[in-house]
Amino acid sequence: MTFGSAPERFTEDGGLERVVLRPALRLRGHPAHPVGGGLLRATAGATLVHLHQMRSAPARAVAVAALLRRQRSVVTDHGLGGGGWGGLLPRLFDRFACVSRYSAAVMAAPAAKTHIVYGGADAGRYRPGDEPRAGVLFVGRVTPHKGIDRLIEALPPGAALTVCGTTGHDRRAPERTYPDLLRQLARGRDVRFLEHVSEAELPLLYRRAAVFVLPSVEHTCFGRHIEISELLGLSLLEAMASATPVVCSGVGGLSEVVMNGETGYVTEPGDVEALADRISILLRDAPLARRMGEAARRHVMAEFTWERCAERCLDVYAELEAL
Protein backbone atom coordinates (compact mmCIF):
# COMPACT_ATOMS: atom_id res chain seq x y z
CA MET A 1 0.00 0.00 0.00
CA THR A 2 1.42 3.35 -1.02
CA PHE A 3 0.45 6.85 -2.14
CA GLY A 4 0.26 8.35 -5.61
CA SER A 5 -1.38 11.03 -7.74
CA ALA A 6 -4.30 8.77 -8.64
CA PRO A 7 -5.98 5.96 -6.66
CA GLU A 8 -5.39 2.49 -8.07
CA ARG A 9 -5.69 -1.17 -7.09
CA PHE A 10 -4.30 -4.14 -9.00
CA THR A 11 -2.76 -7.57 -8.46
CA GLU A 12 0.66 -8.50 -9.84
CA ASP A 13 1.37 -11.84 -11.54
CA GLY A 14 2.87 -13.25 -8.36
CA GLY A 15 -0.29 -12.50 -6.37
CA LEU A 16 0.83 -9.32 -4.64
CA GLU A 17 -2.01 -6.83 -4.37
CA ARG A 18 -0.95 -3.20 -4.74
CA VAL A 19 -3.14 -0.38 -3.50
CA VAL A 20 -2.34 3.24 -4.37
CA LEU A 21 -4.08 5.89 -2.27
CA ARG A 22 -4.43 9.54 -3.22
CA PRO A 23 -3.53 11.70 -0.19
CA ALA A 24 -5.67 14.64 0.82
CA LEU A 25 -2.51 16.65 1.44
CA ARG A 26 1.18 16.33 2.33
CA LEU A 27 2.29 17.90 5.59
CA ARG A 28 4.74 20.75 4.91
CA GLY A 29 4.63 19.62 1.28
CA HIS A 30 6.98 16.74 2.13
CA PRO A 31 6.65 13.54 0.04
CA ALA A 32 7.17 11.36 3.12
CA HIS A 33 4.19 12.86 4.96
CA PRO A 34 1.02 12.16 2.95
CA VAL A 35 -2.17 12.12 5.00
CA GLY A 36 -5.73 11.03 4.27
CA GLY A 37 -6.72 9.00 1.27
CA GLY A 38 -8.50 6.41 3.39
CA LEU A 39 -5.30 4.93 4.87
CA LEU A 40 -6.76 3.97 8.24
CA ARG A 41 -9.81 2.42 6.62
CA ALA A 42 -7.66 0.53 4.11
CA THR A 43 -5.45 -1.01 6.83
CA ALA A 44 -8.30 -1.92 9.20
CA GLY A 45 -8.52 -5.57 8.14
CA ALA A 46 -4.84 -6.41 8.43
CA THR A 47 -3.52 -8.94 10.91
CA LEU A 48 -0.04 -7.42 10.75
CA VAL A 49 1.15 -4.09 9.35
CA HIS A 50 4.73 -3.56 8.17
CA LEU A 51 5.39 0.19 8.07
CA HIS A 52 8.25 2.07 6.44
CA GLN A 53 9.79 5.33 7.68
CA MET A 54 9.05 5.30 11.41
CA ARG A 55 8.79 9.09 11.68
CA SER A 56 6.54 9.61 8.65
CA ALA A 57 2.97 10.81 9.11
CA PRO A 58 1.38 7.61 7.72
CA ALA A 59 3.52 5.37 9.94
CA ARG A 60 2.63 7.35 13.05
CA ALA A 61 -1.10 7.26 12.28
CA VAL A 62 -1.22 3.56 11.43
CA ALA A 63 0.97 2.61 14.41
CA VAL A 64 -1.46 4.28 16.81
CA ALA A 65 -4.43 2.69 15.04
CA ALA A 66 -2.74 -0.75 15.11
CA LEU A 67 -2.21 -0.47 18.84
CA LEU A 68 -5.88 0.32 19.39
CA ARG A 69 -6.98 -2.44 17.00
CA ARG A 70 -4.59 -4.99 18.54
CA GLN A 71 -2.86 -5.48 15.21
CA ARG A 72 0.80 -6.51 15.18
CA SER A 73 3.16 -3.92 13.74
CA VAL A 74 6.67 -4.03 12.26
CA VAL A 75 8.66 -0.97 11.22
CA THR A 76 11.61 -0.40 8.89
CA ASP A 77 13.28 2.98 8.70
CA HIS A 78 15.22 4.47 5.81
CA GLY A 79 16.75 7.54 7.42
CA LEU A 80 13.86 10.00 7.64
CA GLY A 81 14.47 12.51 10.42
CA GLY A 82 11.96 13.95 12.84
CA GLY A 83 10.82 13.70 16.43
CA GLY A 84 10.03 10.54 18.33
CA TRP A 85 7.30 11.83 20.64
CA GLY A 86 9.71 11.97 23.55
CA GLY A 87 10.66 8.31 23.15
CA LEU A 88 7.06 7.11 22.94
CA LEU A 89 6.98 6.53 19.18
CA PRO A 90 9.30 3.46 19.11
CA ARG A 91 7.24 1.87 21.87
CA LEU A 92 4.25 1.60 19.51
CA PHE A 93 5.90 -1.09 17.36
CA ASP A 94 6.12 -4.81 18.10
CA ARG A 95 9.24 -5.43 16.03
CA PHE A 96 11.95 -3.47 14.21
CA ALA A 97 13.12 -4.86 10.86
CA CYS A 98 16.27 -2.81 10.32
CA VAL A 99 18.28 -2.52 7.12
CA SER A 100 21.59 -2.61 9.03
CA ARG A 101 23.04 -2.70 12.52
CA TYR A 102 23.84 0.97 12.04
CA SER A 103 20.18 1.69 11.24
CA ALA A 104 19.12 -0.10 14.42
CA ALA A 105 21.49 2.08 16.43
CA VAL A 106 20.18 5.26 14.79
CA MET A 107 16.59 4.24 15.58
CA ALA A 108 17.55 3.28 19.14
CA ALA A 109 15.66 0.09 18.46
CA PRO A 110 15.33 -2.16 21.53
CA ALA A 111 17.56 -5.21 21.06
CA ALA A 112 14.90 -7.71 22.14
CA LYS A 113 12.54 -6.49 19.38
CA THR A 114 15.12 -5.98 16.61
CA HIS A 115 15.95 -8.07 13.57
CA ILE A 116 18.47 -7.05 10.89
CA VAL A 117 16.86 -7.85 7.53
CA TYR A 118 19.25 -5.78 5.38
CA GLY A 119 18.20 -5.10 1.78
CA GLY A 120 19.23 -6.61 -1.50
CA ALA A 121 20.10 -6.48 -5.14
CA ASP A 122 18.31 -8.15 -8.02
CA ALA A 123 21.01 -10.70 -8.82
CA GLY A 124 19.40 -11.52 -12.17
CA ARG A 125 19.37 -7.93 -13.35
CA TYR A 126 22.71 -7.00 -11.81
CA ARG A 127 25.09 -9.74 -12.91
CA PRO A 128 28.52 -10.09 -14.49
CA GLY A 129 28.82 -10.18 -18.27
CA ASP A 130 31.39 -10.46 -21.04
CA GLU A 131 31.81 -6.70 -21.54
CA PRO A 132 35.37 -5.35 -21.23
CA ARG A 133 35.86 -3.40 -18.01
CA ALA A 134 37.41 0.04 -17.72
CA GLY A 135 37.22 3.13 -15.55
CA VAL A 136 35.59 4.14 -12.29
CA LEU A 137 31.84 4.37 -11.63
CA PHE A 138 29.72 6.22 -9.08
CA VAL A 139 25.95 5.73 -8.89
CA GLY A 140 23.80 7.76 -6.53
CA ARG A 141 22.30 11.16 -5.86
CA VAL A 142 24.58 14.05 -6.71
CA THR A 143 24.55 15.69 -3.29
CA PRO A 144 27.40 16.79 -0.97
CA HIS A 145 27.24 13.98 1.57
CA LYS A 146 28.03 11.46 -1.18
CA GLY A 147 31.58 12.83 -1.31
CA ILE A 148 31.85 12.90 -5.11
CA ASP A 149 34.20 15.88 -4.84
CA ARG A 150 36.69 13.67 -2.96
CA LEU A 151 36.35 10.99 -5.61
CA ILE A 152 37.17 13.44 -8.41
CA GLU A 153 40.21 14.65 -6.47
CA ALA A 154 41.29 11.04 -5.89
CA LEU A 155 40.96 9.98 -9.53
CA PRO A 156 44.31 8.51 -10.65
CA PRO A 157 45.97 10.13 -13.70
CA GLY A 158 44.59 8.74 -16.93
CA ALA A 159 41.59 7.07 -15.26
CA ALA A 160 38.07 7.78 -16.48
CA LEU A 161 35.17 8.41 -14.10
CA THR A 162 31.44 8.16 -14.78
CA VAL A 163 29.15 9.92 -12.30
CA CYS A 164 25.61 8.57 -12.68
CA GLY A 165 22.92 10.31 -10.68
CA THR A 166 20.33 13.03 -10.53
CA THR A 167 20.91 16.58 -9.31
CA GLY A 168 18.59 19.12 -7.72
CA HIS A 169 18.29 17.47 -4.29
CA ASP A 170 19.66 20.50 -2.42
CA ARG A 171 17.53 23.65 -2.43
CA ARG A 172 19.64 25.92 -0.27
CA ALA A 173 22.98 27.61 -0.88
CA PRO A 174 25.76 26.66 -0.86
CA GLU A 175 24.71 22.99 -1.24
CA ARG A 176 22.66 23.72 -4.35
CA THR A 177 25.86 24.79 -6.13
CA TYR A 178 27.39 21.34 -5.62
CA PRO A 179 26.91 20.14 -9.25
CA ASP A 180 28.69 23.28 -10.46
CA LEU A 181 31.54 22.65 -8.02
CA LEU A 182 31.92 19.10 -9.33
CA ARG A 183 32.13 20.29 -12.92
CA GLN A 184 34.83 22.77 -11.94
CA LEU A 185 36.81 20.02 -10.20
CA ALA A 186 36.38 17.78 -13.26
CA ARG A 187 38.04 20.23 -15.65
CA GLY A 188 41.10 18.65 -17.21
CA ARG A 189 40.06 15.18 -16.02
CA ASP A 190 38.26 12.37 -17.84
CA VAL A 191 34.91 12.73 -16.06
CA ARG A 192 31.44 12.43 -17.56
CA PHE A 193 28.14 13.15 -15.81
CA LEU A 194 25.04 11.09 -16.64
CA GLU A 195 21.97 12.50 -14.96
CA HIS A 196 19.35 10.41 -16.69
CA VAL A 197 20.06 6.73 -17.36
CA SER A 198 17.52 4.20 -18.61
CA GLU A 199 16.62 1.08 -16.66
CA ALA A 200 18.30 -1.01 -19.36
CA GLU A 201 21.53 1.01 -19.34
CA LEU A 202 22.23 1.00 -15.60
CA PRO A 203 23.18 -2.71 -15.31
CA LEU A 204 25.55 -2.25 -18.26
CA LEU A 205 27.32 0.60 -16.48
CA TYR A 206 27.99 -1.67 -13.51
CA ARG A 207 29.22 -4.52 -15.72
CA ARG A 208 31.55 -2.27 -17.72
CA ALA A 209 33.16 -0.56 -14.72
CA ALA A 210 36.54 -1.74 -13.44
CA VAL A 211 35.87 -0.24 -10.01
CA PHE A 212 32.78 1.10 -8.25
CA VAL A 213 33.31 3.81 -5.64
CA LEU A 214 30.93 5.14 -2.97
CA PRO A 215 32.94 7.83 -1.11
CA SER A 216 30.27 9.15 1.28
CA VAL A 217 31.44 11.53 4.00
CA GLU A 218 30.56 12.55 7.53
CA HIS A 219 31.51 16.20 6.87
CA THR A 220 30.75 17.75 3.49
CA CYS A 221 32.99 20.10 1.54
CA PHE A 222 30.73 22.91 2.79
CA GLY A 223 31.45 22.06 6.42
CA ARG A 224 28.11 20.44 7.20
CA HIS A 225 28.08 17.45 9.55
CA ILE A 226 25.94 14.56 8.30
CA GLU A 227 24.13 12.91 11.20
CA ILE A 228 22.59 9.97 9.33
CA SER A 229 24.48 8.70 6.30
CA GLU A 230 24.25 5.49 4.25
CA LEU A 231 22.05 3.18 6.26
CA LEU A 232 22.96 0.35 3.89
CA GLY A 233 24.21 1.30 0.40
CA LEU A 234 22.10 -0.38 -2.27
CA SER A 235 24.32 0.85 -5.09
CA LEU A 236 27.21 -1.04 -3.49
CA LEU A 237 25.15 -4.23 -3.54
CA GLU A 238 24.20 -3.70 -7.18
CA ALA A 239 27.86 -3.24 -8.12
CA MET A 240 28.92 -6.28 -6.10
CA ALA A 241 26.18 -8.38 -7.69
CA SER A 242 27.69 -7.35 -11.03
CA ALA A 243 31.05 -8.80 -9.88
CA THR A 244 32.54 -5.31 -9.75
CA PRO A 245 35.06 -4.68 -6.96
CA VAL A 246 34.13 -1.73 -4.77
CA VAL A 247 35.79 1.01 -2.75
CA CYS A 248 33.74 2.79 -0.11
CA SER A 249 34.18 4.92 2.96
CA GLY A 250 33.46 3.46 6.36
CA VAL A 251 30.34 5.46 7.15
CA GLY A 252 26.99 4.15 8.33
CA GLY A 253 26.24 0.61 7.28
CA LEU A 254 28.67 0.43 4.35
CA SER A 255 31.26 -1.59 6.27
CA GLU A 256 28.54 -4.17 7.02
CA VAL A 257 28.24 -4.78 3.28
CA VAL A 258 31.87 -4.69 2.10
CA MET A 259 34.40 -7.19 3.40
CA ASN A 260 37.55 -5.07 3.48
CA GLY A 261 40.32 -6.66 1.44
CA GLU A 262 38.05 -9.45 0.16
CA THR A 263 35.15 -7.95 -1.82
CA GLY A 264 36.65 -4.46 -2.01
CA TYR A 265 38.18 -1.82 0.21
CA VAL A 266 36.84 0.36 3.02
CA THR A 267 38.59 3.69 3.63
CA GLU A 268 38.34 6.47 6.19
CA PRO A 269 35.62 8.99 5.25
CA GLY A 270 37.06 11.95 3.34
CA ASP A 271 40.56 10.43 2.98
CA VAL A 272 41.44 11.37 -0.60
CA GLU A 273 44.87 9.71 -0.49
CA ALA A 274 43.42 6.39 0.69
CA LEU A 275 40.71 6.54 -1.99
CA ALA A 276 43.32 7.21 -4.69
CA ASP A 277 45.52 4.36 -3.45
CA ARG A 278 42.76 1.72 -3.38
CA ILE A 279 41.35 2.79 -6.74
CA SER A 280 44.83 2.65 -8.28
CA ILE A 281 45.45 -0.85 -6.91
CA LEU A 282 42.28 -2.21 -8.49
CA LEU A 283 42.81 -0.41 -11.80
CA ARG A 284 46.35 -1.70 -12.30
CA ASP A 285 45.89 -5.23 -10.89
CA ALA A 286 43.23 -6.83 -13.08
CA PRO A 287 43.56 -10.35 -11.59
CA LEU A 288 43.07 -8.97 -8.06
CA ALA A 289 40.10 -6.90 -9.20
CA ARG A 290 38.56 -9.97 -10.83
CA ARG A 291 39.01 -12.09 -7.69
CA MET A 292 37.47 -9.39 -5.51
CA GLY A 293 34.60 -8.94 -7.93
CA GLU A 294 33.87 -12.65 -7.97
CA ALA A 295 33.99 -12.75 -4.17
CA ALA A 296 31.64 -9.76 -4.06
CA ARG A 297 29.12 -11.57 -6.26
CA ARG A 298 29.26 -14.65 -4.03
CA HIS A 299 28.78 -12.50 -0.94
CA VAL A 300 25.66 -10.86 -2.40
CA MET A 301 24.23 -14.21 -3.50
CA ALA A 302 24.68 -15.59 0.01
CA GLU A 303 23.44 -12.64 2.07
CA PHE A 304 22.09 -9.71 0.09
CA THR A 305 19.51 -10.79 -2.48
CA TRP A 306 15.93 -9.58 -2.18
CA GLU A 307 14.94 -13.21 -1.62
CA ARG A 308 17.13 -13.33 1.49
CA CYS A 309 15.66 -10.03 2.65
CA ALA A 310 12.13 -11.39 2.18
CA GLU A 311 13.00 -14.56 4.11
CA ARG A 312 14.26 -12.46 7.02
CA CYS A 313 11.08 -10.39 7.00
CA LEU A 314 8.95 -13.56 7.01
CA ASP A 315 10.91 -14.78 10.02
CA VAL A 316 9.93 -11.57 11.84
CA TYR A 317 6.26 -12.07 10.95
CA ALA A 318 6.36 -15.71 12.04
CA GLU A 319 7.83 -14.73 15.38
CA LEU A 320 4.95 -12.33 15.99
CA GLU A 321 2.35 -14.89 14.91
CA ALA A 322 3.77 -17.31 17.46
CA LEU A 323 3.20 -14.92 20.37
Image (cartoon, grey):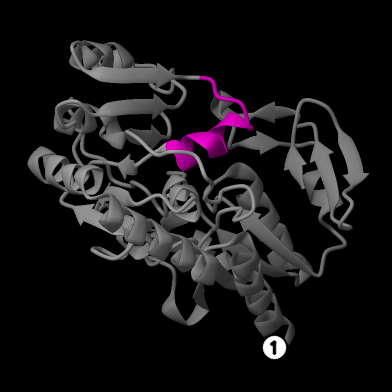
Residue furthest to the left in view is 273
Residue 253 at least partly seen: no
Q: Whole-percent x and y of residue 245?
A: 35, 52
Q: Residue at x 30, y 60 (%)?
A: 255
Residue 36: percent from left, percent from top: 76, 37
Residue nearer the viewer, 233 or 204: 204
The residue singled out by tag 1 in the image is: 323
Secondary element at tag 1: loop
In this view of the protein, which residue sits in the foreground, 170 or 90? 170
Residue at position x 65%, y 73% in the image: 311
* In magenta segment, residue 202: yes
Where 268 falls versus 317 (above or below)? Answer: above
Which residue occupies 33% across, 50% down? 246
- What is the count of numbered marks? 1
Residue 28 falls in which quadrant of the image? top right
Q: Is residue 206 above or below residue 254?
A: above
Under mark 1, the amino acid is: Leu
Where are the magenta residues, as a range?
196-208
